[in-house]
Amino acid sequence: MEDHHSAFDSSDIELLEKSVEETLEHGCKECGFRHIIFTTNVALEPNGTKAFFLEVECPKCESEYRDIMAMK
Ligand SMILES: [Zn+2]
């Protein structure tokens, strides 16, 4: 039986926080605007790989994109 609650541990959260920091340092990838709006997401692939990504919305140039930050 699978336990989805144990799928993500504290090292995942650490990786996520570090990746967010790095991504935000560069700002919007279209215009470089620093104050982008974002939400974080983690997807668990069927093979057990975790994909950490960021859904970004830029209030300046109005671009929206999904940025994969890390795979584990
Ligand atoms: Zn932008």
Image (tube, helix red, strand yellow):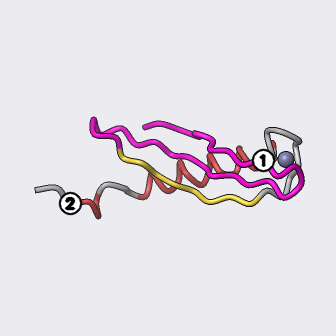
Q: Amino acid at mark 1?
A: Ser
Secondary element under disc 2, as helix, strand or loop, is loop
Q: Is residue 28 left or right of residue 4?
A: right
Residue at left offset 53%, top offset 54%: 14
> Residue at horizontal 62%, vertical 44%?
66
Q: Is the residue marked by circle 2 packed among few (<14), some (14-19), or many (20+) residues within 10 Å?
A: few
Please identify the quadrant where the C terminus is shown. top left
Q: Is residue 14 magenta?
A: no
**What's the magenta region?**
45-72
The quadrant of the rendering that contains the N terminus is bottom left
In the image shown, does 67 or 17 lie closer to the viewer? 67
Residue 17 image offset from top left, x and y in percent: 60, 55
**Label 1 vs label 2: CA separation?**
37 Å
Nearest to N terminus: mark 1 or mark 2: 2
Q: Which mark is residue 63?
A: 1
- The image quarter containing residue 36 is bottom right
